[in-house]
Amino acid sequence: MEELPELQELSMSADEISKLVDTYVIPWGLNIIFALLIFFIGKALVGIIVKLVKKLMGKAKMDSILVNFIGSIVKTVLLLFVVIAALDQLGVNTTSLIALIGAAGLAIGLALQGSLQNLASGVMLIVFRPFTDGDFVEAGGATGVVEEIGIFTTKMRTGDNKEIIIPNGQIFGSNITNYSARDTRRVDMVFGIGYDDDIRKAKQIIADILAADERILKDPEPLIAVGELADSSVNFNVRPWVNSADYWSVYFDLNEKIKLTFDEQGISIPYPQMDVHHPKAD
């Protein structure tokens, strides 16, 4: 008994649908499911890895700014790998995607070369710590107290309360003088007396003033020595040691005390002068 034409067409349509399901729907559905699993499981693993990295850096007592910055980089890179793996599961040609990402990264790197230099310098400053917040430093052509060390710039406050923001690349690429790095500092001063004055008396006056100042350290012992026989004066090099916090107060006080005591004791502090002789007219 022959089948009706309508039943034959229906049977062929069912076969085609079944073939379509077996060929496309099921494989694509499985690929989508696996891609989603790769993405969500990978994302969870990335979170765990980032937390572990931050915890290890925290135990190493690294700066919180650097910890968060490195954590963000690690998270971004790992998530990128997860996304590429998920797309590869879907059959996307990830080779071209990776090449595109690399080209884009190169272009961005060239465009932001100066910023990347400041970024790298900021990381180096945070890792090696040539100075920290509150230190009085000379760096990047400026002198002041460090208020904030950022990823790209460092903020300093000058003695007259001006705020200076310096690119980290400029700081790390030049000499850094940290005046707060040591507990003690030497105050280097020069005092001149006249050639007609008593050298021994002047030296004793300076020694007595230094001995009476409790801020001046006994060890190392202060140096008082004739450093130069200049054109108009005999110059004493005076070099006492003090705690770093007392540097400027001692410096200013010694200048005042020695000048006043020299005046009281008749010790002159000469200044450059010139003798002009006029020949007598005939």
Image: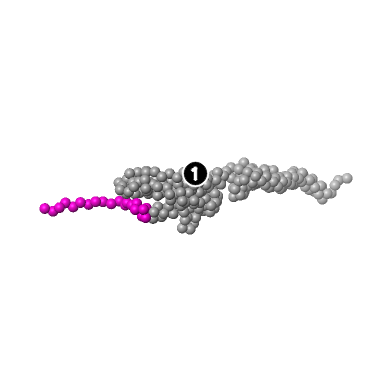
Picture residue at 22% right of the left edge, 52% below the top: 276
- What number of labels is visible? 1
Q: Which SS does the magenta portion mostly show?
A: loop
x and y, in percent, of residue 130 in the image? 52, 45
User: Which residue position is annotated with label 1?
Assistant: 219
| Nearest the eye: 211 or 84 | 211
x and y, in percent, of residue 167 in the image? 49, 50
Instruction: Please give left or right for residue 55 compared with residue 118 in the image.
Output: right
Picture residue at 63% right of the left edge, 43% below the top: 60
Which quarter of the rendering shows the N terminus? top right
| Nearest the eye: 246 or 85 | 246
Q: Residue furthest bottom?
A: 161
* The stretch drawn in magenta includes residue 47: no
Q: Residue furthest right?
A: 1
Instruction: Please give left or right for residue 110 compared with residue 255 in the image.
Output: right
Picture residue at 50% right of the left edge, 49% below the top: 243
Question: Which residues are drawn in magenta?
Answer: 262-282
Task: Answer yes or no: is residue 159 visible.
Answer: yes
| Nearest the eye: 277 or 97 | 277
| Nearest the eye: 141 or 93 | 141
x and y, in percent, of residue 240 in the image? 45, 47
The amino acid type of the residue labelled 1 equals Asp
Instruction: Please give left or right for residue 67 compared with residue 209 in the image.
Output: right
x and y, in percent, of residue 251 in the image? 44, 52
Task: Answer yes or no: is residue 165 visible.
Answer: no
Query: Dot 1, crowdedness within 10 Å: few (<14), some or many (≥20)?
Result: few
